[in-house]
Image: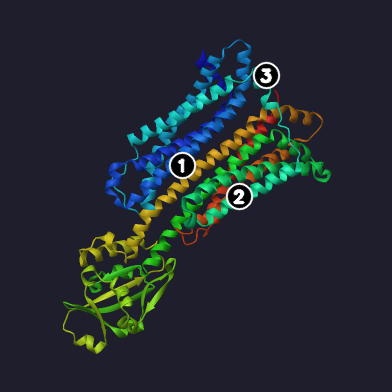
């Protein structure tokens, strides 16, 4: 009987459960994908360059798990609020609290476990697609990758089962401890506003101060380190809550007091709707703002690291391709690159020295990385033959373009006539730049590998002069951030939108009577729909704006890892705002269909 009642309850609130279900499916799918990549032993042992990505995805799964736990408790509380009238009716008909608790437990755990199973299947599909994305999008060579991981599946099922077990107990305990009258009247009982301007002003000042302090701690993490992260987290969460609690109440009170604004169309009704149960809105908006910041921040930082990889490789390796013994290289393959810079330096090698022609360097100065107090600069040094002949540091820069077997020998720059008199085989060092490195990556990589295998016994991992090898190294280190950012961003966005939907839809049934009264006194449907769009728009816009501010200040934390974390900021912001707008439109549509449906 309990199973039948539980299934009937789920069916009766199917639309609401679908919103929760979709968020849980996405969360468990992404969690599985992270775990499958981090626990695939054959994949890890055969791809040593991805060692950093393992930590990245482990960190991502832990962060996702923490947020998922909070999301499950928060979202389920909305469902319990929607169902508590039904539970109160069961109690009035004689149902014991223990049976009600069992029914709540079944509903919560059944939905959660089903979402986890489906999410794991979706996660396998995502994991399978990641292999193709890593190879084609990030130019990584991946072997022994398997989308299915029994260990990842077990970890996902156990972790989410424990989450839903705790959530089910929490929900069951919370409902059964309440009196029947409280269950019947709680959702329709407004929270009274405390209109104390001085208290609201102090809260606003303290909240803004907390945000400012948190932003300051994030701006210089090199100085504050872990203490800065902890302090910023606490103060920003506290500041977000206080700002919403004080500013939102003050703004609503001011708008309602202004007849010019409040009496225009249905504005007064809209402000009253927002004022109703304002304390619950404050908590929800605070959580939504933090989730918004996490989601947008993850997406922004992930894409930012991807943009940084070619820039970092370019700063360390000035030339796109280095050809030792270039006279042996395939001339047609080199010509197909359409080089924008193609410099050839003549070489002669003896037992103790490598000879170059000074005039060639004077005519075409050598490019070398330039270092400043912050590390490698984006600009290059131009080293002439005269400088290299006299400066040992400049000679070390030239030595980086030689093969490993030549670097222990002395570098000597001589005149063209003296060079011709040296009795040794003449070879050439060819340095090339192309118009678009990433477009020419495959051809450059083929030539660079051939050059390495034919001219030196040095392993590719030790060569930090060929740009393709430098690119591969940085790619292996940082490309995981892009995928972690993308999938974490989507997961947090789904949870964020679900929480907003739940909060809005949980009060929809109680709002039906108010909208019906307005329609009966002649209010046009178009005005009612406009009021709905404004009300829900405020609930989406306010946390979105504050979340964006959090992200803009939070990006300061990555200035030590990225050259410009604000580069191309419009790309992730545009993507995220578009997805956010879709959730807003969906919420407006669902809410409108509930409160303005025609009774047949």
Give the camera-side residue of 215 and 493: 215
State the quadrant of the C terminus.
top right
Toward the right, the furthest residue is 259
Say which label, 1 or 2, has the lower sequence index. Answer: 1
Q: Position of residue 284 (x, y in %)?
A: 61, 37
Q: Position of residue 290 (x, y in %)?
A: 56, 44
Say which label, 1 or 3, has the lower sequence index. Answer: 1
Q: Position of residue 293 (x, y in %)?
A: 55, 47
Q: Which mark is residue 211?
A: 2
Q: Can the viewer see residue 10 in this picture? A: no
Cα–Cα gap, marks 2 and 3:
40 Å
- Name the residue rendered at 68%, 46% in the picture: 204
Say which label, 2 or 3, has the lower sequence index. Answer: 3
Q: Position of residue 188 (x, y in %)?
A: 70, 26
Q: Which mark is residue 63?
A: 1
Toward the top, the furthest residue is 94
From the image, tell me which residue sits under label 3: 181
Element type at mark 2: helix
């Amino acid at each position: 009987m309990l199973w039948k009642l539980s299934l009937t309850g789920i069916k009766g609130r199917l639309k609401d459960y679908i919103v929760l279900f979709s968020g849980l499916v996405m969360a468990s799918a992404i969690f599985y994908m992270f775990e499958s990549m981090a626990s695939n032993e054959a994949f890890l042992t055969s791809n040593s360059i991805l060692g950093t990505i393992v930590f990245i995805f482990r960190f991502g799964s832990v962060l996702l798990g923490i947020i998922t736990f909070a999301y499950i408790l928060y979202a389920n509380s909305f469902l319990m609020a929607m169902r508590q009238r039904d539970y109160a009716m069961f109690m009035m008909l004689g149902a014991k609290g223990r049976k009600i608790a069992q029914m709540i437990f079944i509903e919560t755990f059944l939905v959660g476990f089903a979402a986890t199973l489906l999410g794991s299947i979706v996660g396998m599909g995502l994991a399978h697609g990641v292999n193709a994305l890593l190879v084609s999008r990030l130019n990584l060579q991946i072997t022994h990758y398997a989308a299915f991981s029994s260990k990842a599946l077990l970890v996902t099922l156990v972790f989410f089962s424990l989450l839903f077990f705790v959530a089910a107990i929490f929900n069951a305990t919370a409902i059964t401890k309440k009196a029947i009258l409280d269950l019947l009247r709680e959702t329709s009982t407004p929270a009274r506003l405390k209109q104390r301007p001085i208290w609201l002003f102090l809260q606003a000042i303290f909240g803004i101060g907390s945000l400012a302090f948190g932003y300051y701690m994030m701006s210089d993490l090199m100085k504050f380190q872990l203490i800065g992260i902890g302090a910023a987290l606490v103060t920003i969460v506290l500041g977000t809550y206080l700002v919403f609690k004080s500013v939102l109440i003050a703004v609503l009170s001011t708008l309602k007091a202004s007849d010019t604004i409040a009496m225009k169309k249905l504005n007064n009704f809209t402000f009253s709707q927002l004022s109703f149960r304002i304390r619950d809105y404050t908590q929800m908006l605070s959580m939504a703002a933090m989730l918004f910041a996490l989601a947008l921040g993850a997406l922004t930082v992930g894409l930012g690291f991807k943009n940084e990889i070619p820039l970092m490789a370019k700063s360390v390796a000035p030339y796109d391709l280095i050809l030792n013994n270039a006279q042996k290289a395939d001339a047609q393959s080199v010509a197909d690159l359409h080089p924008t810079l193609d410099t050839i330096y003549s070489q002669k090698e003896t037992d103790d020295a490598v000879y170059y022609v000074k005039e060639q360097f004077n005519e075409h100065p050598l490019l070398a990385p330039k270092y400043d107090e912050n590390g490698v600069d984006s600009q290059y040094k131009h080293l002439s033959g005269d400088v290299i002949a006299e400066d040992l540091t400049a000679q070390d820069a030239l030595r980086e373009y030689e093969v490993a077997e030549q670097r222990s020998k002395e570098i000597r720059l001589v005149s063209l006539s003296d060079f011709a008199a040296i009795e040794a085989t003449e070879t050439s060092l060819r340095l090339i730049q192309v118009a678009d490195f990433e477009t020419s990556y495959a051809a450059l990589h083929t030539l660079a590998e051939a050059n390495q295998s034919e001219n030196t016994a040095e392993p590719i991992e030790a060569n930090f002069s060929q740009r393709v090898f430098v690119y591969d190294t940085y790619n292996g280190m940082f490309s995981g951030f892009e995928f972690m950012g993308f999938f974490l961003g989507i997961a947090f966005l789904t949870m964020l939108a679900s929480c907003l939907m739940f909060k809005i839809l949980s009060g929809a049934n109680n709002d039906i009577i108010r909208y019906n009264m307005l329609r009966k006194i002649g209010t046009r449907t178009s005005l009612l729909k406009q009021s709905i769009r404004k009300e829900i728009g405020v609930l989406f816009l306010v946390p979105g704006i504050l979340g964006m501010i959090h992200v803009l200040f939070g990006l300061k934390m990555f200035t030590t890892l990225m050259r410009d974390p604000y580069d191309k900021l419009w790309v992730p912001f545009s993507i995220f705002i578009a997805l956010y707008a879709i959730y807003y439109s969906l919420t407006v549509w669902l809410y409108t269909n509930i409160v303005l449906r025609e009774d047949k």
